Image: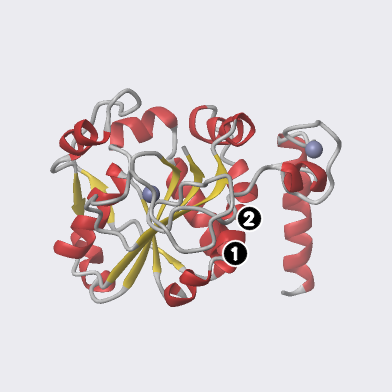
């Protein structure tokens, strides 16, 4: 980086400090490092650690040493190889995602992507996905316009900057879907049928590659399954893993 570039970056981050008050999002302690959480709060946010379901990432309390699948995943069809989430679905982690998703605090993506990077590095199964493409779960354009952005895309883009993976919006949502919050998995799957399509301009780039689907929350896995299904069938993708910030 040239001296001039460094100055520009410095001026830019000082400008951002004016726009966004540089205090920790959780404890309000003043910050100087350009992120949104202080080190103490960052360390305290509960990560998902072993044991967890090897298919859906659901954490379990207790001592299980062998690889296992949870009861939900037993006999369930899912077109992704495995799904992994970084953080437990507790009020603190949901509060941060809520800010990103509904309050247009897109600057939080930079902070939250650090958790995703941590998981990419710590879960040995991602070693097979070193040259994979990151594909964010898309929103329907009208919802994206309403929220002024897509939280999955923001996370994916920031993770791409940190990890060096390519980030490609290879899937589009071609029809609006009802909110899934109150639906069970079966209802979610039928709600999502024919909701996604591969973007033609990216079809040749993703063919025969591996993909990591990026989203903010993994709940029943219906969205991840439907995205994985079209990536494999229509996009001819080789293998699909899922990485989300929270296991809801
Ligand atoms: Zn703090
Ligand atoms: Zn499971």
Query: Which one is in front, 23 or 60?
Result: 60
Residue occupying image coordinates x 77% and y 37%: 24
Q: Earlier in the sequence, mark 1 or mark 2?
A: 2
For residue 93, what is the image quadrant? top right
Label 1 residue near ligand 1, CB within 8 Å: no
Whole-angstrom CA distance, mark 1 to mark 2, is: 8 Å
Image x and y of residue 238, in percent: 26, 73
Horizontal side of residue 58 vs 105, given as left or right: left
Frontmost of labels 1 and 2 is 2
Q: Residues within 10 Å of mark 1 (few under 14, many from 20)?
A: some
Relative vertical location of residue 222 with respect to residue 92 in this rendering, above or below = below
Residue linked to disc 1: 162
As helix, strand or loop, the secondary structure at mark 2 comes to helix
Mark 1 and mark 2 in contact? Answer it, CB < 8 Å. Answer: yes
Relative vertical location of residue 48 with respect to residue 202 in this rendering, above or below = above
Relative vertical location of residue 236 with respect to residue 69 in this rendering, above or below = below
Horizontal side of residue 219 vs 119, given as left or right: left
Horizontal side of residue 189 vs 217, given as left or right: left
Q: How many marks?
A: 2
Residue linked to disc 2: 114
Q: Which mark is residue 50?
A: none
Residue occupying image coordinates x 23% and y 49%: 226
Residue occupying image coordinates x 49% and y 33%: 101
Image x and y of residue 212, in percent: 39, 62
Q: Is residue 199 visible?
A: no
Query: Which one is in front, 57 or 180?
Result: 57
Image x and y of residue 200, in percent: 18, 61
Horizontal side of residue 146 vs 246, given as left or right: left
Q: Is residue 32 visible?
A: yes
């Amino acid at each position: 980086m040239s001296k001039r570039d460094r100055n520009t970056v410095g001026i830019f981050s000082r400008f951002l400090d004016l726009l966004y008050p540089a205090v920790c999002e959780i404890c309000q302690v003043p910050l100087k490092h350009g992120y949104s959480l202080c080190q103490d709060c960052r360390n305290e946010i509960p990560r998902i650690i072993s044991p967890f379901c090897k298919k859906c990432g659901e954490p379990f309390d207790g001592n299980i040493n062998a690889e296992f699948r949870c009861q939900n995943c037993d006999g369930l069809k899912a077109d992704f190889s495995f799904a992994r989430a970084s953080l437990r679905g507790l009020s603190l982690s949901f509060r941060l995602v809520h800010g990103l998703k509904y309050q247009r605090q897109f600057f939080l993506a930079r902070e939250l992507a650090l958790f995703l990077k941590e998981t990419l590095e710590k879960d040995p199964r991602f070693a097979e996905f070193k040259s994979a493409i990151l594909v964010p779960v898309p929103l329907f354009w009208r919802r994206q316009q309403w929220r002024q952005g897509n939280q999955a895309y923001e996370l994916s883009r920031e993770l791409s900057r940190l990890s060096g993976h390519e980030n490609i919006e290879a899937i589009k949502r071609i029809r609006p879907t009802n909110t899934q919050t109150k639906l069970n998995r079966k209802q979610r799957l039928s709600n999502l049928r024919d909701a996604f399509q591969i973007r033609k301009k990216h079809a040749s780039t993703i063919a025969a590659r591996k993909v990591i689907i990026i989203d903010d929350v993994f709940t029943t896995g219906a969205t991840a399954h439907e995205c994985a299904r079209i990536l494999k069938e229509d996009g001819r993708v080789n293998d699909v893993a899922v990485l989300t910030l929270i296991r809801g």
